Image (cartoon, rainbow, N blue to C red):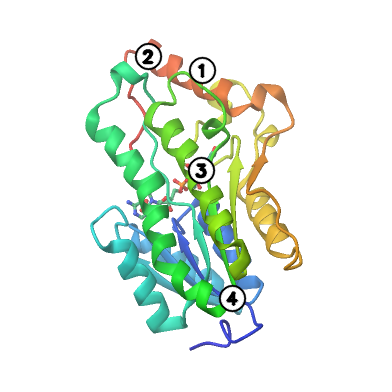
Amino acid sequence: MSAAGVAGGPPVALVAGASSGIGAAVARRLAARGSAVALVGRREAELKEVAESIREAGGTALPFALDLAEPGAPADAVAATAAALGPVGLLVCSAGAIRLAAVHETEERHWERQVRVNLTVPFLLARAVLPGMRERGHGWVVNIGSGVGSEVVPGSGGYGVSKHAVHRLTELIHEENRDFGVRAVTVAPGWVSTRLAARPSDLGVPEEEVLDAEDIADTVAWLLDRPARMSVGPLVRVEPSASRAAAGDAMTRHLNRSRARGAGPAAEENR
Ligand SMILES: NC(=O)c1ccc[n+]([C@@H]2O[C@H](COP(=O)([O-])OP(=O)(O)OC[C@H]3O[C@@H](n4cnc5c(N)ncnc54)[C@H](OP(=O)(O)O)[C@@H]3O)[C@@H](O)[C@H]2O)c1
Protein backbone atom coordinates (compact mmCIF):
# COMPACT_ATOMS: atom_id res chain seq x y z
CA MET A 1 0.00 0.00 0.00
CA SER A 2 1.25 3.53 -0.78
CA ALA A 3 1.49 6.35 1.79
CA ALA A 4 -1.90 7.48 0.55
CA GLY A 5 -4.68 5.62 2.30
CA VAL A 6 -3.00 5.37 5.71
CA ALA A 7 -5.22 6.55 8.57
CA GLY A 8 -5.70 10.32 8.44
CA GLY A 9 -3.69 10.66 5.22
CA PRO A 10 -5.02 11.48 1.76
CA PRO A 11 -7.45 8.74 0.73
CA VAL A 12 -6.77 6.30 -2.08
CA ALA A 13 -8.91 7.54 -4.98
CA LEU A 14 -10.60 5.74 -7.83
CA VAL A 15 -11.57 8.00 -10.71
CA ALA A 16 -13.93 6.44 -13.24
CA GLY A 17 -13.64 8.21 -16.60
CA ALA A 18 -10.10 9.43 -15.97
CA SER A 19 -8.83 9.20 -19.54
CA SER A 20 -9.89 12.72 -20.53
CA GLY A 21 -11.82 15.85 -19.66
CA ILE A 22 -13.19 16.38 -16.17
CA GLY A 23 -12.09 12.98 -14.84
CA ALA A 24 -8.48 13.50 -15.97
CA ALA A 25 -8.38 16.98 -14.41
CA VAL A 26 -9.86 15.72 -11.13
CA ALA A 27 -7.43 12.77 -11.06
CA ARG A 28 -4.44 15.09 -11.51
CA ARG A 29 -5.76 17.35 -8.75
CA LEU A 30 -6.30 14.47 -6.33
CA ALA A 31 -2.81 13.15 -6.99
CA ALA A 32 -1.37 16.63 -6.38
CA ARG A 33 -3.17 16.57 -3.02
CA GLY A 34 -1.38 13.32 -2.11
CA SER A 35 -3.91 10.66 -3.08
CA ALA A 36 -2.74 7.56 -4.90
CA VAL A 37 -5.16 7.44 -7.83
CA ALA A 38 -6.58 4.55 -9.85
CA LEU A 39 -7.44 5.80 -13.33
CA VAL A 40 -10.27 3.90 -15.00
CA GLY A 41 -11.56 4.18 -18.56
CA ARG A 42 -11.52 2.24 -21.82
CA ARG A 43 -8.76 4.10 -23.71
CA GLU A 44 -5.51 2.64 -22.47
CA ALA A 45 -3.14 5.05 -24.23
CA GLU A 46 -4.93 8.11 -22.82
CA LEU A 47 -5.01 6.60 -19.32
CA LYS A 48 -1.28 5.91 -19.51
CA GLU A 49 -0.68 9.51 -20.57
CA VAL A 50 -2.63 10.84 -17.59
CA ALA A 51 -0.76 8.42 -15.28
CA GLU A 52 2.57 9.53 -16.72
CA SER A 53 1.76 13.22 -16.22
CA ILE A 54 0.85 12.48 -12.59
CA ARG A 55 4.08 10.56 -12.01
CA GLU A 56 6.13 13.33 -13.62
CA ALA A 57 4.56 15.73 -11.13
CA GLY A 58 5.63 13.45 -8.26
CA GLY A 59 2.29 11.69 -7.69
CA THR A 60 1.11 8.08 -7.72
CA ALA A 61 -1.32 6.79 -10.34
CA LEU A 62 -2.15 3.46 -11.94
CA PRO A 63 -4.15 3.05 -15.14
CA PHE A 64 -6.83 0.35 -15.32
CA ALA A 65 -8.22 0.01 -18.83
CA LEU A 66 -11.73 -1.35 -18.40
CA ASP A 67 -15.15 -0.94 -19.98
CA LEU A 68 -17.15 -0.18 -16.85
CA ALA A 69 -20.39 -1.00 -18.68
CA GLU A 70 -19.36 -4.67 -18.83
CA PRO A 71 -20.85 -6.98 -16.19
CA GLY A 72 -18.59 -7.20 -13.14
CA ALA A 73 -16.22 -4.43 -14.30
CA PRO A 74 -17.05 -1.84 -11.58
CA ALA A 75 -16.44 -4.38 -8.78
CA ASP A 76 -13.27 -5.56 -10.56
CA ALA A 77 -11.99 -1.96 -10.73
CA VAL A 78 -12.56 -1.47 -7.00
CA ALA A 79 -10.89 -4.80 -6.16
CA ALA A 80 -7.90 -4.11 -8.42
CA THR A 81 -7.45 -0.67 -6.84
CA ALA A 82 -7.59 -2.10 -3.32
CA ALA A 83 -5.04 -4.77 -4.22
CA ALA A 84 -2.60 -2.31 -5.81
CA LEU A 85 -3.02 0.88 -3.77
CA GLY A 86 -5.22 0.14 -0.75
CA PRO A 87 -8.94 0.40 -0.04
CA VAL A 88 -10.78 3.13 -1.94
CA GLY A 89 -11.52 6.09 0.34
CA LEU A 90 -12.58 8.49 -2.40
CA LEU A 91 -14.67 7.51 -5.39
CA VAL A 92 -15.13 9.95 -8.24
CA CYS A 93 -17.45 8.87 -11.02
CA SER A 94 -16.95 10.98 -14.12
CA ALA A 95 -17.58 8.29 -16.76
CA GLY A 96 -20.36 9.48 -19.02
CA ALA A 97 -22.19 8.58 -22.22
CA ILE A 98 -24.37 10.97 -24.22
CA ARG A 99 -26.63 10.60 -27.22
CA LEU A 100 -29.03 13.48 -27.67
CA ALA A 101 -32.48 12.79 -29.12
CA ALA A 102 -36.14 13.39 -28.37
CA VAL A 103 -37.78 10.54 -26.48
CA HIS A 104 -39.64 9.25 -29.56
CA GLU A 105 -36.42 9.26 -31.58
CA THR A 106 -34.23 7.55 -28.99
CA GLU A 107 -33.07 4.08 -29.88
CA GLU A 108 -33.40 1.50 -27.11
CA ARG A 109 -29.70 0.61 -27.22
CA HIS A 110 -28.72 4.27 -26.81
CA TRP A 111 -31.11 4.66 -23.89
CA GLU A 112 -29.71 1.54 -22.25
CA ARG A 113 -26.11 2.58 -22.81
CA GLN A 114 -26.65 5.97 -21.16
CA VAL A 115 -28.53 4.50 -18.21
CA ARG A 116 -25.81 1.87 -17.82
CA VAL A 117 -22.83 4.24 -17.93
CA ASN A 118 -24.39 7.30 -16.26
CA LEU A 119 -26.44 5.60 -13.55
CA THR A 120 -25.79 1.87 -13.10
CA VAL A 121 -22.00 2.22 -13.15
CA PRO A 122 -22.02 4.87 -10.35
CA PHE A 123 -24.42 2.63 -8.40
CA LEU A 124 -22.22 -0.46 -8.80
CA LEU A 125 -19.05 1.45 -7.92
CA ALA A 126 -20.69 2.96 -4.84
CA ARG A 127 -22.04 -0.42 -3.79
CA ALA A 128 -18.53 -1.85 -3.98
CA VAL A 129 -16.81 0.91 -1.96
CA LEU A 130 -19.43 1.84 0.65
CA PRO A 131 -19.16 -1.15 3.02
CA GLY A 132 -15.42 -0.52 3.53
CA MET A 133 -15.92 3.23 3.94
CA ARG A 134 -18.63 2.66 6.55
CA GLU A 135 -16.41 0.22 8.40
CA ARG A 136 -13.47 2.64 8.42
CA GLY A 137 -15.76 5.56 9.34
CA HIS A 138 -14.55 7.73 6.50
CA GLY A 139 -15.12 8.16 2.79
CA TRP A 140 -16.20 10.29 -0.12
CA VAL A 141 -18.40 9.55 -3.10
CA VAL A 142 -18.35 12.26 -5.76
CA ASN A 143 -20.56 11.78 -8.81
CA ILE A 144 -20.33 14.09 -11.79
CA GLY A 145 -23.94 14.81 -12.70
CA SER A 146 -25.15 17.51 -15.05
CA GLY A 147 -27.12 20.72 -15.09
CA VAL A 148 -29.48 19.04 -17.55
CA GLY A 149 -30.21 16.44 -14.87
CA SER A 150 -31.92 19.23 -12.96
CA GLU A 151 -33.63 20.95 -15.87
CA VAL A 152 -36.14 19.67 -18.40
CA VAL A 153 -34.25 20.10 -21.66
CA PRO A 154 -36.04 18.75 -24.76
CA GLY A 155 -33.73 16.35 -26.59
CA SER A 156 -31.66 15.50 -23.52
CA GLY A 157 -33.38 12.08 -23.55
CA GLY A 158 -31.64 9.20 -21.82
CA TYR A 159 -28.78 11.50 -20.85
CA GLY A 160 -30.97 13.95 -18.89
CA VAL A 161 -32.98 11.14 -17.30
CA SER A 162 -29.90 9.18 -16.21
CA LYS A 163 -28.25 12.32 -14.81
CA HIS A 164 -31.44 13.22 -12.93
CA ALA A 165 -31.43 9.73 -11.46
CA VAL A 166 -27.77 9.85 -10.47
CA HIS A 167 -28.50 13.07 -8.57
CA ARG A 168 -31.09 11.12 -6.57
CA LEU A 169 -28.72 8.16 -6.15
CA THR A 170 -26.16 10.50 -4.60
CA GLU A 171 -28.78 11.98 -2.26
CA LEU A 172 -29.63 8.49 -1.08
CA ILE A 173 -25.97 7.63 -0.53
CA HIS A 174 -25.60 10.86 1.42
CA GLU A 175 -28.60 10.17 3.67
CA GLU A 176 -27.78 6.52 4.25
CA ASN A 177 -24.14 7.08 5.13
CA ARG A 178 -23.91 10.50 6.77
CA ASP A 179 -23.68 8.96 10.25
CA PHE A 180 -20.87 6.65 9.12
CA GLY A 181 -18.41 9.41 8.23
CA VAL A 182 -19.14 9.09 4.53
CA ARG A 183 -19.99 12.16 2.49
CA ALA A 184 -21.60 12.02 -0.94
CA VAL A 185 -22.01 14.85 -3.38
CA THR A 186 -23.00 15.35 -7.00
CA VAL A 187 -21.10 18.05 -8.82
CA ALA A 188 -23.44 18.98 -11.67
CA PRO A 189 -21.67 21.11 -14.26
CA GLY A 190 -23.13 23.20 -17.00
CA TRP A 191 -21.22 23.45 -20.27
CA VAL A 192 -17.60 22.39 -19.90
CA SER A 193 -15.21 22.48 -22.82
CA THR A 194 -14.37 18.77 -23.34
CA ARG A 195 -14.68 16.19 -26.12
CA LEU A 196 -18.13 15.20 -24.83
CA ALA A 197 -19.69 18.64 -25.28
CA ALA A 198 -20.39 20.86 -28.29
CA ARG A 199 -17.52 23.11 -29.37
CA PRO A 200 -18.27 26.66 -28.20
CA SER A 201 -17.13 28.11 -31.56
CA ASP A 202 -19.71 25.92 -33.40
CA LEU A 203 -22.48 27.69 -31.49
CA GLY A 204 -21.01 31.18 -31.60
CA VAL A 205 -20.02 31.21 -27.94
CA PRO A 206 -16.56 32.51 -26.98
CA GLU A 207 -14.44 29.69 -25.52
CA GLU A 208 -13.64 31.72 -22.42
CA GLU A 209 -17.34 31.89 -21.45
CA VAL A 210 -17.57 28.11 -21.13
CA LEU A 211 -16.23 26.25 -18.08
CA ASP A 212 -13.10 24.16 -18.35
CA ALA A 213 -12.26 20.88 -16.66
CA GLU A 214 -10.02 22.64 -14.14
CA ASP A 215 -13.05 24.59 -12.85
CA ILE A 216 -14.67 21.30 -11.93
CA ALA A 217 -11.45 19.96 -10.39
CA ASP A 218 -11.30 23.18 -8.30
CA THR A 219 -14.86 22.57 -7.12
CA VAL A 220 -14.14 18.96 -6.14
CA ALA A 221 -10.97 20.01 -4.27
CA TRP A 222 -12.91 22.73 -2.46
CA LEU A 223 -15.57 20.24 -1.37
CA LEU A 224 -12.94 17.79 -0.11
CA ASP A 225 -11.36 20.56 1.96
CA ARG A 226 -14.52 21.16 4.02
CA PRO A 227 -14.18 20.04 7.63
CA ALA A 228 -15.69 16.65 8.57
CA ARG A 229 -18.59 18.34 10.40
CA MET A 230 -19.69 20.05 7.20
CA SER A 231 -21.43 18.65 4.17
CA VAL A 232 -22.24 20.73 1.12
CA GLY A 233 -24.89 19.73 -1.37
CA PRO A 234 -25.57 16.88 -1.90
CA LEU A 235 -26.17 18.60 -5.27
CA VAL A 236 -23.69 21.29 -6.24
CA ARG A 237 -24.34 23.01 -9.56
CA VAL A 238 -21.52 24.79 -11.36
CA GLU A 239 -22.60 26.91 -14.31
CA PRO A 240 -20.99 29.35 -16.73
CA SER A 241 -21.91 32.91 -15.74
CA ALA A 242 -23.02 33.97 -19.23
CA SER A 243 -26.56 33.03 -20.21
CA ARG A 244 -25.52 32.28 -23.80
CA ALA A 245 -23.25 29.55 -22.40
CA ALA A 246 -26.13 27.90 -20.52
CA ALA A 247 -25.94 24.16 -21.17
CA GLY A 248 -29.63 23.42 -21.79
CA ASP A 249 -29.94 26.10 -24.44
CA ALA A 250 -26.65 25.03 -26.03
CA MET A 251 -27.81 21.42 -26.12
CA THR A 252 -31.01 22.35 -27.93
CA ARG A 253 -29.12 24.48 -30.45
CA HIS A 254 -26.57 21.70 -30.95
CA LEU A 255 -29.30 19.15 -31.60
CA ASN A 256 -31.12 21.49 -34.02
CA ARG A 257 -27.84 22.07 -35.84
CA SER A 258 -27.34 18.33 -36.27
CA ARG A 259 -30.88 17.98 -37.62
CA ALA A 260 -30.39 20.90 -40.04
CA ARG A 261 -27.26 19.21 -41.39
CA GLY A 262 -29.49 16.22 -42.13
CA ALA A 263 -27.51 14.10 -39.76
CA GLY A 264 -30.65 13.09 -37.87
CA PRO A 265 -31.47 13.62 -34.26
CA ALA A 266 -28.90 11.20 -32.93
CA ALA A 267 -25.91 12.69 -34.67
CA GLU A 268 -23.85 12.84 -31.50
CA GLU A 269 -20.99 10.50 -30.87
CA ASN A 270 -22.12 7.84 -28.44
CA ARG A 271 -19.35 8.13 -25.90
N1 LIG B 1 -18.59 18.53 -20.86
C1 LIG B 1 -19.73 19.00 -20.39
O1 LIG B 1 -20.27 20.04 -20.82
C2 LIG B 1 -20.41 18.29 -19.24
C3 LIG B 1 -21.47 18.93 -18.60
C4 LIG B 1 -22.12 18.29 -17.56
C5 LIG B 1 -21.71 17.05 -17.16
N2 LIG B 1 -20.68 16.42 -17.80
C6 LIG B 1 -20.30 15.09 -17.32
O2 LIG B 1 -18.94 15.08 -17.00
C7 LIG B 1 -18.45 13.73 -17.08
C8 LIG B 1 -17.13 13.72 -17.81
O3 LIG B 1 -17.33 14.11 -19.16
P1 LIG B 1 -16.31 15.05 -19.93
O4 LIG B 1 -17.07 16.25 -20.34
O5 LIG B 1 -15.07 15.19 -19.15
O6 LIG B 1 -16.06 14.22 -21.28
P2 LIG B 1 -15.00 13.09 -21.64
O7 LIG B 1 -13.65 13.67 -21.71
O8 LIG B 1 -15.53 12.43 -22.86
O9 LIG B 1 -15.07 12.10 -20.39
C9 LIG B 1 -15.92 11.00 -20.34
C10 LIG B 1 -15.17 9.90 -19.66
O10 LIG B 1 -16.03 8.78 -19.49
C11 LIG B 1 -15.29 7.61 -19.80
N3 LIG B 1 -16.19 6.53 -20.18
C12 LIG B 1 -17.25 6.59 -21.03
N4 LIG B 1 -17.79 5.38 -21.15
C13 LIG B 1 -17.06 4.54 -20.36
C14 LIG B 1 -17.11 3.14 -20.09
N5 LIG B 1 -18.03 2.36 -20.64
N6 LIG B 1 -16.21 2.61 -19.24
C15 LIG B 1 -15.25 3.40 -18.68
N7 LIG B 1 -15.15 4.72 -18.90
C16 LIG B 1 -16.04 5.26 -19.75
C17 LIG B 1 -14.40 8.06 -20.95
O11 LIG B 1 -13.28 7.21 -21.04
P3 LIG B 1 -13.02 6.17 -22.24
O12 LIG B 1 -13.56 6.76 -23.50
O13 LIG B 1 -11.54 6.01 -22.21
O14 LIG B 1 -13.73 4.93 -21.80
C18 LIG B 1 -13.96 9.43 -20.46
O15 LIG B 1 -12.85 9.31 -19.61
C19 LIG B 1 -19.55 12.92 -17.75
O16 LIG B 1 -20.26 12.19 -16.78
C20 LIG B 1 -20.45 13.99 -18.35
O17 LIG B 1 -21.78 13.54 -18.47
C21 LIG B 1 -20.02 17.01 -18.83
The kind of residue on which mark 2 rests is Arg
Q: CA distance from mark 1 to mark 3?
A: 27 Å
Front tag of 2 and 4: 4
Which residue is labeled 4 in the image?
Answer: 137
Which residue is labeled 2 in the image?
Answer: 259
For the point 29% across and 57% down, the residue is 67
The kind of residue on which mark 1 rests is Arg
Q: CA distance from mark 2 to mark 4?
A: 51 Å
Q: Residue 5: percent from the left, percent from the top?
A: 56, 82
Answer with the quarter of the image where residue 258 lies. Answer: top left
Q: 123 left or right of 181? A: left
Q: Secondary structure at mark 1?
A: helix
Tag 3 or tag 4, which sits nearer the N-term? 4
Looking at the picture, does residue 210 appear above or below residue 205?
A: below
Classify mark 4 as within 8 Å of ligand 1 or not, answering yes or no.
no
Tag 2 or tag 1, which sits nearer the N-term? 1
Answer with the quarter of the image where residue 191 lies. Answer: top right
**Residue 253: which disc?**
1
Looking at the picture, does residue 109 appear above or below residue 64?
A: above
